[in-house]
Image (cartoon, grey):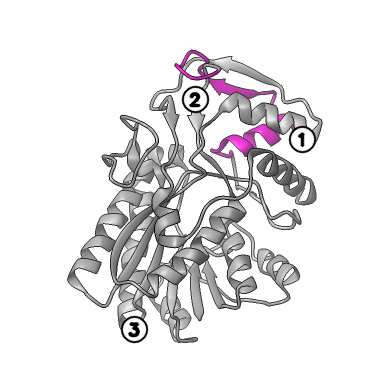
């Protein structure tokens, strides 16, 4: 199969490209490089011995997208491209709606024009808002707290509508939780531009002295140690989930949402202590008050992924912390 990967030089996208190539797929990547680097393609080739075709292209550039789609026949699209910083989305909502929503509409137009019927969408657990109860199932109520999350939910709605109207169209909406870690080689890793939004890059910045200390928001929640519980998943497990979803999306029609997580909740301090233990490092941190919009606990029910995709996460918290630090050390 020949797979087109949007945003394929990003953190999750690049790891998925590696798994696709290792599973015998041909891969074409396009990315506007707004939050990644073209040198990732060299690293993917070094890891797999295969070089994916690459186009520097923005989704909203129709001429560029025509060049991408006319370069080969694609059996499926895996769609990662989009802005993803929650705080930035609150400050610049129109930028997020234009890029994420309008860009996806262009992508769908191109798929229809060129006869590509299968799409895997990179959704997010943010579509669950603050869950009423955990673990979160795919039938849990949907709501969002910020423009970034709303773009994910809007795109899900668009894809459901397309699948309902076009019986030849198939889409899998992968709602994943908190990806961390990196390829065990350390060669490709999380490398966010600007101020990172996620916990693991902030831990690494604190260890390196790039920030004075890690701020832990709230230690008075009704959890094991008072800090928030999240479902952290190794990015390699997540990438393998996309390969499993590829088998499903090409053999079933319609639309289905599937959680990708470990199914195990981990507190902020448990992740921090695991990082310290496996890397023999000390993480400076301080406790601050609760952050508005944070849920005490969010973790996944992953039974549907096992049932439909035959997929379960295989790597643990220590693996995530060890690989994240190795990747950080190897990539500056």
Q: Secondary structure at mark 3?
A: loop
Disc assigned to residue 90: none
Quadrant assignment, res 168: bottom left
The CA distance from mark 1 to mark 2 is 22 Å
Q: Nearer the viewer, residue 165 or 150?
A: 165
Q: Are marks 3 and 1 in contact (CB under 8 Å)?
A: no
Answer whether residue 327 is magenta in the image: no
Q: Are there few (<14), some (14-19), or many (20+) residues within 10 Å of tag 2?
A: many
Highlighted magenta segment, given as a residue range: 195-224
Residue tagged 1: 278
Q: Is residue 92 above or below residue 122?
A: above
Q: Nearer the viewer, residue 212 or 118?
A: 118
Q: Are marks 3 and 2 in contact (CB under 8 Å)?
A: no
Q: Position of residue 309 (x, y in %)?
A: 44, 61
Quadrant assignment, res 156: bottom left
Disc assigned to residue 228: 2
Residue tagged 3: 115
């Amino acid at each position: 199969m020949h797979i087109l990967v949007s945003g394929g030089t990003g953190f999750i996208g690049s790891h998925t490209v590696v798994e696709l190539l290792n599973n015998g797929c041909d891969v074409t990547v396009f990315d506007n490089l707004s939050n990644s680097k073209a040198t990732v393609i060299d690293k993917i080739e070094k890891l797999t011995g295969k070089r994916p075709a690459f186009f520097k292209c923005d989704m909203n550039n129709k001429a560029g997208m025509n060049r991408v789609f006319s370069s080969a026949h694609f059996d499926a699209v895996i769609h990662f491209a989009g802005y993803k910083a929650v705080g930035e989305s609150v400050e610049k909502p129109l930028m997020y709606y234009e890029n994420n929503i309008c860009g996806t509409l262009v992508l769908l137009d191109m798929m229809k024009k060129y006869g590509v019927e299968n799409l895997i969408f990179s959704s997010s657990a943010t579509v669950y808002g603050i869950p009423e109860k955990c673990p979160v199932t795919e039938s849990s109520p949907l709501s969002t707290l910020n423009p970034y999350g709303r773009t994910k939910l809007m795109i899900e709605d668009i894809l459901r509508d397309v699948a309902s109207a076009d019986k030849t169209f198939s889409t899998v909406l992968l709602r994943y939780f908190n990806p961390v870690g990196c390829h065990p080689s350390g060669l490709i890793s999380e490398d966010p531009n600007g101020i990172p939004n996620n916990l693991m890059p902030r831990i690494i910045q604190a260890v390196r002295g790039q920030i004075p200390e890690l701020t832990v928001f709230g230690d008075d929640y009704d959890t094991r140690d008072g800090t928030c519980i999240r479902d952290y998943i190794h990015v390699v497990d997540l990438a393998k989930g996309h390969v499993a979803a590829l088998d499903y999306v090409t053999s079933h029609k319609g639309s289905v949402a599937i959680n990708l997580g470990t199914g195990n909740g981990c507190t902020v301090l448990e992740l921090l202590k695991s990082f310290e233990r496996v890397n023999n490092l000390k993480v400076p941190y301080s406790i601050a008050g609760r952050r508005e919009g944070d849920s005490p606990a969010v973790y996944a029910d992953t039974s549907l992924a096992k049932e439909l995709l035959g997929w379960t996460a295989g790597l643990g918290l220590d693996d995530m912390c060890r690989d994240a630090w190795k990747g950080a050390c190897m990539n500056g």
